[in-house]
Amino acid sequence: MARTLRRTVVALTALLLGASVSLAVAAPAAAHDQLVSTFPIADSTVDASPAEITLTFNAALNPDPASMVIEVIGSDGENYAEDPPSAQDDVFVMQHLADTAPNGLFTVRWKVVSSDGHPISGEYSYTVAATITPTATAEPTASETPTPEPTTSSNNDTGAAGHGEPTGGGALLPTLAAVTGALILGGAVIVILMVARERRRRDRLEQEMQDDGE
């Protein structure tokens, strides 16, 4: 029984060490560079198509233009990205747009190579909606029926210049930590139960030996 208990303890120790190694390896994998902001801001509405869009990442990227792919797809299915993308300060990626970009919904699809050499990609959208300008109304004459004054309507949901809010993130590390904690707790409970069982068996043997001696 003592040999079985030792084997169990060794197996549990190996299991816990393996879980710890897996957690340590998974931590760097979850730490790939991420897109933290864009201009125009993701899911925002701007009143005119910008001459260029920018993407900001949390770490230096591979600055080689050949490693970057950015498409700006309009609601008509056309790609309005013009010229290859360029990197500035290794964390900002700039993409020029064609002057013919119309109003409507645009989907930005991007792919870059992060600082650890792994390709990362994603997409987001923004909308271009021009502000409505009221038309002038002629003054009514004495013989005409007065025309009501026009009201001014405008689209106030415009995008702000600059960089926007974070668009991405994964939560792999907390899940691995929870699994590792559960394995450690379960192993400890099994060891305690087996030690208690061995102690009860030993006590019964000693009691039987005392009874036989009497």
Image (tube, rainbow, N blue to C red):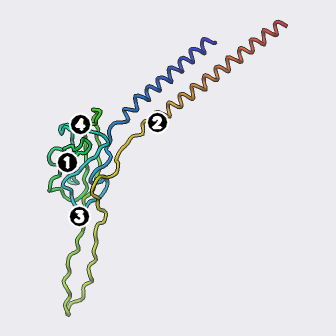
Q: CA distance from mark 2 to mark 3?
A: 45 Å
Mark 1 / mark 2, whichever is N-terminal: 1
Circle 3 is placed at which residue position?
Answer: 130
Kindly report which numbered mark, 4 or 1, lies closer to the viewer in this rendering: 4
Q: CA distance from mark 1 to mark 2?
A: 37 Å
Q: Quadrant of the C terminus?
A: top right
Residue type at the position of mark 1: Gln
Relative to 22, 62 lies left or right: left
Q: CA distance from mark 4 to mark 1?
A: 16 Å
| Camera-side residue of 202 and 65 | 65
Quadrant position of residue 208: top right
Pinpoint residue 119: horizontal percent, then vertical percent.
Answer: 27, 35
Residue type at the position of mark 3: Ala
Check disc 3 and report its element: helix, strand or loop.
Answer: loop
Mark 4 / mark 3, whichever is N-terminal: 4
Mark 2 / mark 3, whichever is N-terminal: 3
User: In the current view of this chain or complex, which residue is farthest to the front?
Assistant: 89
Check disc 4 and report its element: helix, strand or loop.
Answer: loop
Circle 2 is placed at which residue position?
Answer: 175
Mark 1 / mark 3, whichever is N-terminal: 1
Badge 2 density bin: few <14, some 14–19, many ≥20, Cα 10 Å? few
Q: CA distance from mark 1 to mark 3?
A: 22 Å
